Image (cartoon, rainbow, N blue to C red):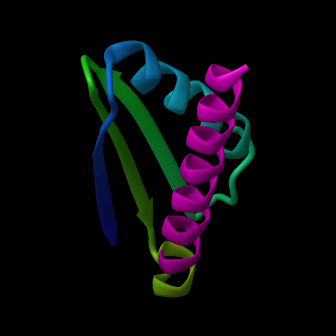
Amino acid sequence: MKAVIKLHAEDARKARSLVRATIPDNIHTPRHLRIRSSARGRQVTFGIETSRLDTLVATVDDLLSCVQAAEESMNALRRF
């Protein structure tokens, strides 16, 4: 099973930051799970592959939560 998530950031710098912010979560994954991420211009792409539906759903949920937390952190830093 595969899922591709594409997001559009405000600018290319923020797109790269979102990818870097999620890398630590993607380093050590179970054998049945593969996550790839990239930033091209303003577009951020996450590709998720797994053989298990429950893992796919949980990973998408976790990844979107991490992206949201990273965006909120960047916005908070911008205000200061």
Quarter placement of the N terminus: bottom left
Residue furthest to the bottom in view is 54
Which residue is at 56% across, 52% downward?
Answer: 68
Q: Main secondary structure of the magenta part?
A: helix
Q: Quarter of the image holding residue 49?
A: bottom left
Q: Is residue 77 or residue 26 the one in the foreground? A: 77
Look at the picture and state if 13 lies above or below 77: above
19 vs 44, left or right, is right
Is 63 situated left or right of 30 in this image?
left
Residue closer to the observer: 45 or 79 = 79
Q: Is residue 23 visible?
A: no
- x 43%, y 36%: residue: 37
Left-right relation of 49 to 63: left
Task: Answer whether residue 37 is visible to the viewer in this image.
Answer: yes
Q: Quadrant of the C terminus?
A: top right
Q: Nearer the viewer, residue 61 or 33?
A: 61
Residue at (56% x, 40% y) in the render: 71
Horizontal and vertical percent for residue 67? 55, 48
Q: Is residue 12 left or right of residue 62?
A: left
Task: Point out residue 8 in the picture as x, y percentages from the top left corner.
Answer: 27, 38
Mark count: 0
Against 9, residue 40 (above or below) is above
In the displayed structure, 61 sits above or below 34; it is: below
Magenta residues (range): 57-80
The quadrant where residue 45 appears = top left
